[in-house]
Amino acid sequence: MAEKKGGVSYESIMRDLKARKFAPIYILMGDESYYIDKIADYIATNALTPEEQDFNQTVLFGLDVNPSQVVDQARRYPMMAEYQVVIVKEAQNLRNLEAIEKYVDAQMMKSTILVLCFMNGSLDRRKKVVSNMLAKAEKGGGVVFESKKKRESDLPYFIEDYLKSKNTAIDRKSAQMIADHIGSDLSRLISELDKVLISLPENNREVTPDVVEHEIGVSKDFNGYELRDAVVNRDVFKANQIIKYFDNNPKAGSLYSFLPMLFNYFQNLMTAYYAPNKTNENSVAQHLDLKSAWAAKDYMKGLRNYSGMKTMQIISKIREIDAKSKGLDNPNTGPGELMKELIFFILH
């Protein structure tokens, strides 16, 4: 579940927090709100006792305050406690960060834990005030953490790790089914996983395709994982069965959800052709930055089933279908017919 950006990881931050090694400032930013919320929530819940929180914990919102007010709050001394906690949510709405830059440049209050949560993207490091603030914060013992969206290929590992932390096992197909259905919104993904965990009996802590089908509503036979598998193996009959199912059950899956999956696969397959040794699973896995040689198996099959030229043509076709699905040069062809057109082109 590691998320490492700029030399600091989510795990290392949480490890220090649980050991009560608090930094004077936490600058949390990025597109993935899950890790930002987890860090801020842990500090809010655990840095102070419930009794201390009444007088020493302040939650502000970026729209309601300016940076000078944040700094004024941070410079206060705690009352009958070792620390005071100041959390600024939606900090991306703060205007002119010079006051905070000056605060981190001066001697930051060691008795203050200042948490700035910049959501929906990272700060622009090209701006002098931002680059100075981040550099000075790190130099002064602060934490700068950038939380980026998970890659689609990393989601099954995230699911496995999360369930493992809850003493629950899951097979690779089930993990991929959930990843394909939910996508990279980690907050929603965790919510669905927690729902599955509640449904499991105490004497059988294992998530199977049957469990996923029952609890999340993804068919164990007709889903993104099976479609991808059919494409990888050039199984024409199976692929057409799945496409027909989706055509009759639009809520179960659509062109819009499967285009990114197919594009990512063939884009990686094209990259695999440039691996130093494309006949070796370990070499291909390393070249594609995959977590294990096992994860390269589908690309090894793809290298056997699709030529480099065909792979390039498929990538071009996916882009064409994507444009048509958005109405470009396509007056009336529906998503179902476009999906059939794409699968036919890929497999023939």
Image (cartoon, rainbow, N blue to C red):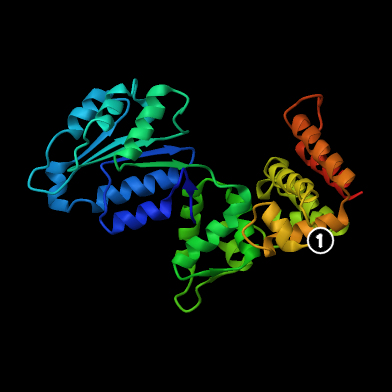
Residue in the image at 80% along x and 56% along y:
278
| Residue 87, x across and y down, in percent | 27, 38
Q: Check disc 1: other Cα within 10 Å, few if <14, some if 14-19, many if 20+.
A: some
Q: Residue 157 lies in what quarter of the image?
A: bottom right
In the rendered image, is residue 314 in sight?
yes
Q: Locate residue 31 relative to residue 45 in the image: left or right.
A: right
Furthest residue to the bottom? 203
* Badge count: 1
| Residue 273, x across and y down, in percent | 81, 50
Q: Locate residue 47 relative to residue 287 in the image: left or right.
A: left
The amino acid marked with disc number 1 is Thr
Which residue is disc 1 drawn over?
A: 279
Residue in the image at 81% along x and 55% along y:
302
At mark 1, the secondary structure is loop
Nearest the viewer among 160 and 224 is 160
Furthest residue to the front? 139
Considering only vertical position in the picture, is 87 above or below 161?
Answer: above
Q: Locate residue 171 relative to residue 228 in the image: left or right.
A: left
| Residue 17, x across and y down, in percent | 30, 54
Q: Locate residue 9 relative to residue 246 in the image: left or right.
A: left
| Residue 144, x across and y down, in percent | 38, 40
In the rendered image, is residue 90 in sight?
no
Nearest the viewer among 329 and 277 is 277
Considering only vertical position in the picture, is 126 above or below 303?
Answer: above
Furthest residue to the left? 80
Residue in the image at 54% along x and 59% along y:
159
Furthest residue to the right? 348
Q: Residue 291 lies in what quarter of the image?
A: bottom right
Residue in the image at 17% along x and 43% along y:
111
